[in-house]
Amino acid sequence: MANAIRTEYELGIALDALWSDISNDCAQCTDPDCKGYVWLTKGDKVRFIDNGIPFIRANGIHGPCFIDSYRRTATGVLDPAVRSPDCPHRLSTGLCTIHANRPLPCRMYPLSLEVLGTGEAFWVLHTNCAHVRRLTGGGGLQPLIEKIGQLLDSLAPKLTQDVLGSFAKVSELSEPTLDESDIIRIRPTSVSNKRVEYLQ
Ligand code: SF4
């Protein structure tokens, strides 16, 4: 249904429904996960503030926000040189301590927004996810791609604009590092990579 999803809250519910049968695959997956710098949407940021969950803002007041996974140097300065730090909210059991408040990128995975080597941004599906691998083996990949397409079609323009706006700020800071053999391009977005400067 066109524009049925109008808020980040509704998008979270739709994503939970999309991935409703992912948990068994996650439980058996031994791939490293919950690493790197997870970005926040506007809604994530408000929820983090309301719940006292720390986050980091890069590049000043209008810059992108991330889960505070940053290491500190001996003098307490943020050290963004670590490429793929562990998320501080992941327990050794694999459980997420902020599951109900986890950011949109966590809720979306194995769907994500990525800037590719060409500088173009896409909604992509990560085919190296155990859940996607199982669906692919059982003939479930095409139905999944169709469901994702329907979900994206259901996003109200303002919501799409807000999510892409948050992602665009992140893409300005990041260099593409994705192995593009591990993704399926679902559809392009209007965001492109205009890399500016690294974390202040
Ligand atoms: S917030 Fe939770 S789901 Fe997201 S990366 Fe951290 S531990 Fe994983």
Image: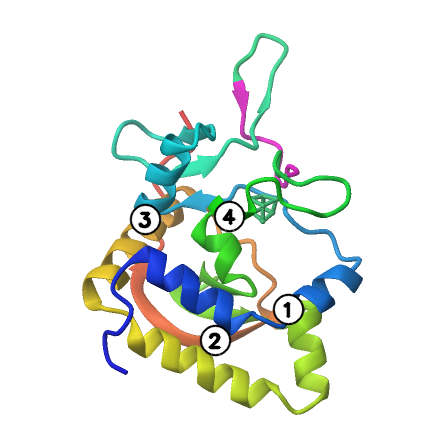
Q: What's under tag 2, amino acid-wise?
A: Arg
| C-alpha gap between disc 4 and disc 1 | 16 Å
Q: Nearer the viewer, mark 4 or mark 1?
A: 4
Q: Nearer the viewer, mark 1 or mark 3?
A: 1
Q: Tell me, yes or no, whether the highlighted magenta stretch contains residue 39.
A: no
Q: What's under tag 4, amino acid-wise?
A: Ala
Q: Earlier in the sequence, mark 1 or mark 3?
A: 1
Give residue 113's position: percent from left, percent from top.
43, 61
Q: What's under tag 3, amino acid-wise?
A: Ser
Q: State which quarter of the image contains the N terminus.
A: bottom left
Check the image and report above or below for 163 versus 137: above
The residue indicated by pointer 3 is 166
**Which structural element holds mark 3?**
helix
| 143 or 53, nearer to the observer | 53
Q: Which mark is residue 185?
A: 2
The residue indicated by pointer 4 is 100
Q: Earlier in the sequence, mark 3 or mark 2?
A: 3
- Give me the residue at 48% from left, 48% from top: 175
Check the image and report above or below for 56 versus 41: above
**Label 3 crowding class (10 Å Cα cut-off): few <14, some 14-19, many 20+?**
some
Q: Earlier in the sequence, mark 4 or mark 1?
A: 1
| C-alpha gap between disc 2 and disc 4 | 28 Å
The residue indicated by pointer 1 is 22
- For ligand 1, tell me if the residue under mark 3 lies within 8 Å: no
Q: Which residues are magenta?
A: 78-86
Check the image and report above or below for 149 versus 84: below
Q: Are marks 3 and 2 in contact (CB under 8 Å)?
A: no
